[in-house]
Image (tube, helix red, strand yellow):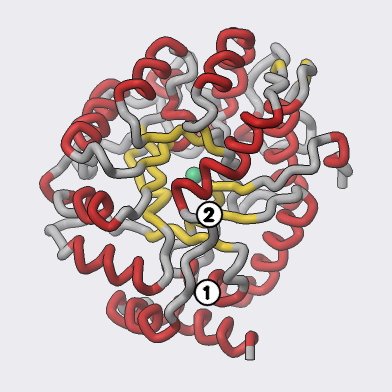
Amino acid sequence: MTVFDFTRFRPMEVYDCHIHFRLREKDSGELESLTSKYTEVFEKARLSRIYMSAGNLGLYLKALDPSRYYIGLEIPSPKKKPDWYRFIESALESGFDGVGEMGSKPAPRAVRVPLDSPLFEGLWSSCEELGFPILCHVADPEEFWSEDTCPDWAKKRGWGPYGADYPTKEELYEEMENVLDTHPRVKVVLAHMYFMTADLERADEFLRSYDNVYLDLALGIELMYNISRRRDDWRDFFIKHRDRIVFGTDIMPWQSVEEAVTRVWMLRMFLETDEEFYTPPSADELLTRYEEPFIGLDLPEEALDKIYRENFTRIFGRGPKSLDVSKARRFLEEQGDDFALKVFEKALESRR
Ligand SMILES: [Zn+2]
């Protein structure tokens, strides 16, 4: 394995707001190896705390390591409107720290539920009222809407090219902004910088219009590429909006330890150094696309600390919410999630 030198970076605490953990019941034999793979990534990449999008398995992770994991609740795609308030409140009381990653990645109009749909009424207001933050993915890079510019790895995954049966990028923005207009106090972290890095002026105006939204840095390699093309302007943007940007990586179960660590390394190179660099060979396929180099932003330490830690704690809390074992158990029973319940009990067992 390529050994990345993390000692070159500042000795700062780094929290990651955007990591995924999932496992299907039929692969349950891999639970322990997957869990220890994540632990290895966190050590090698020097991540101290994690907001984990793991659905109900989040409760398993929290039972294992309550001081490390903040956990995000998965939102079921609603066919009819559930009692959102009750759902959110019982998740919150069980020990969930927020919602997500949920979202609105482009899907055919025929099957999708828009974020501002009446079916989601009650979800946003409950989160707003209970101060429950939401990590949300809206849209995709604009290149994914065109046959010519959509990368092969995206096509292979069914992420474009999005045709006429899909919503446009602007429609997706409009749906999100309808929600933000009606729920001005809801705290939303928009993943992948809201796919707005091709338009700095618009991103600036967006942040000035909505006080409670944050942008996460999870790649989307186009993010680092676009920012590098207007590096000095974006450096000013990062300093100006240092209270609104949150570190995140989009580490996923299918990535190897090396690929996952590479994601952290690239972002830290980008934020902390002024160097030109390229996607290293150890990166996963999703980070390949460009010939031109990325150019580091060399941010001041005070801005880095906000992006790495402080903004995260302002959104998700100083520490992870504590687990209420009996409420968590009841929550999983009510969802009928036997698999999550079984591994949750196993984690509790291992603590004894
Ligand atoms: Zn994600």
**Image-based side of 53 in relation to 137, left or right:** right
Quadrant of residue 218 within the rendered picture: top right
Residue occupying image coordinates x 63% and y 8%: 232
The vertical placement of 37 against 302, above or below, is below
* Image spot of residue 77 (x, y percent): 26, 54
Observer-nearest residue: 71 or 1? Answer: 71
Dot 1 alpha-carbon crowd within 10 angstroms: few under 14, some 14 to 19, many 20 or more: many
Residue 271 image-quadrant placement: top right
With 174 as the anchor, is 198 left or right in this view?
right
Residue at the front extreme, as displayed: 302
Residue at (29%, 44%) from the top-left corner?
Answer: 186
Relative to residue 158, is residue 90 drawn left or right? left
Q: Amino acid at mark 2?
A: Tyr
Indicate whether 215 appears above or below 97.
Answer: above
Q: 159 or 74, which is in the foreground?
A: 74
Mark nearer the N terminus (2 vs 1): 2
> Dot 1 lies on which element?
helix
- Which is nearer the eye, 57 or 157? 57
Quarter of the image with the C terminus in it: bottom right
Mark 1 highlights which residue? 60
For mark 2, does the 10 Å Cα neighbourhood hold few (<14), some (14 to 19), or many (20 or more) residues? many
- Name the residue at 68% across, 23% down: 299
| Identity of the residue drawn at 48% across and 72% down | 322
* Tag 2–tag 1 contact (CB < 8 Å): no
Q: Which circle, 2 or 1, is nearer the viewer? A: 2
Amino acid type of the residue that numbered disc 1 sits on in the rendered structure: Tyr
User: What secondary structure is found at the residue carrying circle 2?
Assistant: strand
Query: How many angstroms separate mark 2 from mark 1 (CA)?
Result: 14 Å
Q: Residue 162 placed where, x, y %?
A: 35, 26
> Horizontal and vertical percent for residue 31?
61, 72
Residue identifier under label 2:
51
